[in-house]
Image (cartoon, grey):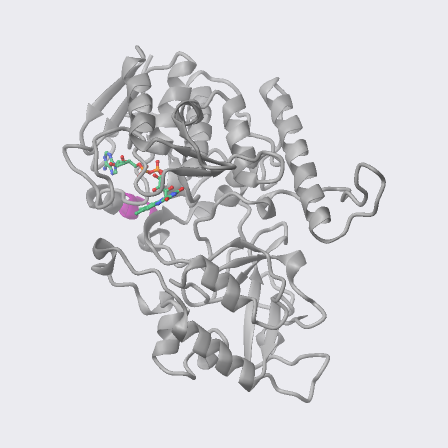
Amino acid sequence: MQPIHIIGGGLAGSEAAWQIAGRGVPVVLHEMRPVQSTAAHKTEALAELVCSNSFRSDERETNAVGLLHEEMRRLGSLIMRCGDANQVPAGGALAVDRDGFSAAVTAALEAHPLIQIRREEIALPPDEWDSVILATGPLTSPALADAIRKLTGEDSLAFFDAIAPIVHRDSIDMSVAWFQSRYDKAGPGGSGADYINCPMTRAQYDAFIDALLAGDKTSFHEWEANTPYFDGCLPIEVMAERGRETLRHGPMKPFGLTNPRQPDVKAYAVVQLRQDNKLGTLFNMVGFQTKLKHAEQVRIFRTIPALEKAEFARLGGVHRNTFLNSPKLLDATLRLKAAPRLRFAGQITGCEGYVESAAVGLMAGRLAVAERLGEPVSLPPPTSAHGALLGHITGGHIETIDAGPRSFQPMNVNFGLFPPLTRMPTRGPDGERLRGPAKTIARKRALSQRALADLDRWIAGDAFPAAAE
Ligand SMILES: Cc1cc2nc3c(=O)[nH]c(=O)nc-3n(C[C@H](O)[C@H](O)[C@H](O)COP(=O)(O)OP(=O)(O)OC[C@H]3O[C@@H](n4cnc5c(N)ncnc54)[C@H](O)[C@@H]3O)c2cc1C
């Protein structure tokens, strides 16, 4: 049988190789280290953790990444098996001994009779490879990135992310904010009332600019600083440094917007949020990419009127990060529409994080092997953490045409990506009415229970429609 080729032996490529070989199909795994390294990797081990040693929360009932851990365990994940075996104490988080973890993944893959590991850089997958998984990560080698860019088009592969914070829609105070598009313009696919607007007085704006200027920021890595970011992606604090009025004439401009509650009072500045996913559960803060530290973002952004109680599904950032405009380029099974023999996995697809990258590797491996064996495509349930991630990558995102950074940006798994419950839990186990945080926890618990029940049905052979259908 022809092997499936995997390029990149990181978190995603290692998991994909394990899933494919586990189904009896041969794999050739091409990893360029140690022949050539990246700016962040330091060893030649497979599945090297380039920064923190944490897989984040292991709490499966109320935390989306903890739920993803559990789903991966149920799907026979090598990354989770080696993570669990190399756990170090970290409270409710799953943290690992990084060397022990990577050594265990490397040993398992090296010992598998159906996996061949070749230490070489692939600059272009040869035509004769009929099934290829590209899992080369956020630091894909420049030669291969160039080849992908030629295949997908100039604007389809980003080299920096420009991540604006994303807020759970139900945490925005709509007694203060209002829906309206600038000058009520409907635009393609819009209604004229597509943005949530948060108004600021002059005093509030001034205090906000002061907070941005004084806020604690993360600096760029030396190797990131050498790659200039273009003007459309400037962090908000850099815009504020250019002049106190810059933001008021950029992403915070108040023009063309009227607060229906106070039509005669013009806001001095307006923060706009735009729907981010088709489900309508998440809204991103338009133009608010930032290098402020996460705790600072929460503190400062909660001073914005209507966002005092904002719950963030994602906080902002700007990093060196190679990733595709996946919702446009990939089909529901992670194949490049323009060249279906090529399938993508890991962070290059627009997920974020070690565990998410491995989970996308797991799905890519299973989909590639099913194709090789002539089996029908079976996508994970959209209600599972895997399905929610796949939905974000291949179709759950709303495309926009605004100037500035591309709207599809990498994202960790979070409950905002899950289809809402048909019935919200309103009462606790002893019949008392749920309020505030207790209600949120009950909702997360119900989402997790639904996810695991549907995943078990999928493992047992039930079919589910694609997440974005
Ligand atoms: C500096 C940095 C810090 C990060 N910190 C964290 C963190 O603390 N926590 C977290 O959850 N996530 C973090 N991430 C994000 C992300 O989760 C990790 O980068 C994760 O490793 C991505 O998994 P992956 O399999 O997609 O890519 P990788 O794990 O990077 O694997 C890609 C592999 O492909 C190889 N490769 C690249 N090009 C080629 C080629 N042409 N031919 C052959 N091989 C090739 C690379 O050598 C590498 O081994 C960080 C990312 C970066 C860049």
Decide whether the magenta segment is chiefly helix, strand or loop. helix
For the question of whether residue 62 can be seen, the reply is yes
Q: In the image, residue 269 lies at what x, y percent?
A: 54, 80
- Quadrant where the C terminus sits is top right
Q: Is residue 369 above or below residue 413?
A: above
Count up the numbered dots: 0
Q: Is residue 441 above or below residue 180?
A: above
Magenta segment boundaries in residue numbering: 148-152
Q: Which residue is drawn at 79% across and 41% down?
A: 428
User: Residue reaching furthest left?
Assistant: 35
Q: In the image, residue 139 lies at what x, y percent?
A: 27, 44
Classify residue 5 as left or right of residue 367: left
* Residue 462 is a magenta residue: no
Image quarter for residue 235?
bottom left
User: Residue reaching furthest right?
Assistant: 431
- Quadrant where the N terminus sits is top left
Q: Is residue 17 above or below residue 451?
A: above
- Nearest to the observer: residue 170 or residue 219: 219
Q: Is residue 400 above or below residue 441?
A: below
Q: In the image, residue 167 lies at what x, y percent?
A: 57, 58
Quarter of the image where ligand 1 sits = top left
Q: Residue at x 29, y 63 (%)?
A: 229
Q: In the image, residue 190 lies at what x, y percent?
A: 61, 64
- Nearest to the observer: residue 113 or residue 402: 113
Image quarter for residue 307?
bottom right
For the question of whether residue 250 can be seen, the reply is no
Q: Which residue is drawn at 56% across and 35% down?
A: 59
Classify residue 468 as left or right of residue 220: right
